[in-house]
Image (cartoon, rainbow, N blue to C red):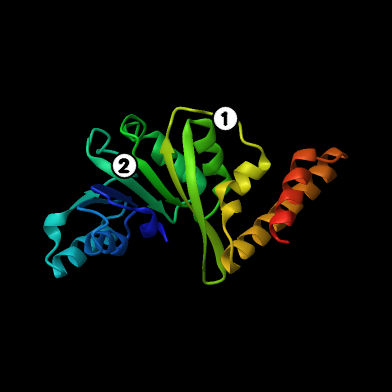
């Protein structure tokens, strides 16, 4: 799914590239002219290096053993940054450590493994526009892939914005599964709030009602 959000890419940075399969796919499909594949662990990065070599495509990639995007902050030609499989908080730290994504208006393609609400909140409050999302499922779990770019316009999101965002525009079985998952999470959070505070939280209630409308 993350690959589908990379269009006419020049240089794509694949953060946490693991074995390099996504990077290779982007090159083979012409979605990227060059990739910068990073990983914090040496073994998976070496597998990515070996994978590219096996296809005689080593010249199309740079491989960097680093945490997130450290060491490439001053690279001037990155058009897309792909971060998939990390939690929302970790994604926030990676983006925050790479100010070039704001200066160059680099497109971010984010597929959080959990805490999607946290990365949405960060994007909204730090001047990024969420352009679109697409829900996806894998092995019975549901996710939403996010495409965002820096505009400098900040706003304070409500609960619905943080937990659903642009995924509310999605349809189909994956969207339904995703909405049901988020609905369950918010109902548990609302119940916990009511137990702890002895009163209702109107923000949770409003978000829950909006999600129920999506499921009709």
Above-or-below relation of 9 to 54: above
> Foreground residue, 156 or 17?
156
Residue at 42% in and 61% down:
1
Residue 124 location, x and y as percent? 53, 35
Which residue is label 2 attached to? 69
Mark nearer the N terminus (1 vs 2): 2
Q: CA distance from mark 1 to mark 2?
A: 26 Å
Quadrant of the rendering where the C terminus is positioned = bottom right
In the displayed structure image, the side of residue 190 where residue 59 appears, left or right: left
Residue at 37% in and 34% down:
97
Which label lies toward us, 1 or 2? 1
Few, some or many residues within 10 Å of mark 2 (<14, 14–19, 20+): many
Which residue is label 1 attached to? 155
Above-or-below relation of 91 to 142: above
In the displayed structure image, the side of residue 28 where residue 173 appears, left or right: right
Few, some or many residues within 10 Å of mark 1 (<14, 14–19, 20+): some
Above-or-below relation of 176 to 66: below
As helix, strand or loop, the secondary structure at mark 1 comes to: loop
In the displayed structure image, the side of residue 75 where residue 213 appears, left or right: right
């Amino acid at each position: 799914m993350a690959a589908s959000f990379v269009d006419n890419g020049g240089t794509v940075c694949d953060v946490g590239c693991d074995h390099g399969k996504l990077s290779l796919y982007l090159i083979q499909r012409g979605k990227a002219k060059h990739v910068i594949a990073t990983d914090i662990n040496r073994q998976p990065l070496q597998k990515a290096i070996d994978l590219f070599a096996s296809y005689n495509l080593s010249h199309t990639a740079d491989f960097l053993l680093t945490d997130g995007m450290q060491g490439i902050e001053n690279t001037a030609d990155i058009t897309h940054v792909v971060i998939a499989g990390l939690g929302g908080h970790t994604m926030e730290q990676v983006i925050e450590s790479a100010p070039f994504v704001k200066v160059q208006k680099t497109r971010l393609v984010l597929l959080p493994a959990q805490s999607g609400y946290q990365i949405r909140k960060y994007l909204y409050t730090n001047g990024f526009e969420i352009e679109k999302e697409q829900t996806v499922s894998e092995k019975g779990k549901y996710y939403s892939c996010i495409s965002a770019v820096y505009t400098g316009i900040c706003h304070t999101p409500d609960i619905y914005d943080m937990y659903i965002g642009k995924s509310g525009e999605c349809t189909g079985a994956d969207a339904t599964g995703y909405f049901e998952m988020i609905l369950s999470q918010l109902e548990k959070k609302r119940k916990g709030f009511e137990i702890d505070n002895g009163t209702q939280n109107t923000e949770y209630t409003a978000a829950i009602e909006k999600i129920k409308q999506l499921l009709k």
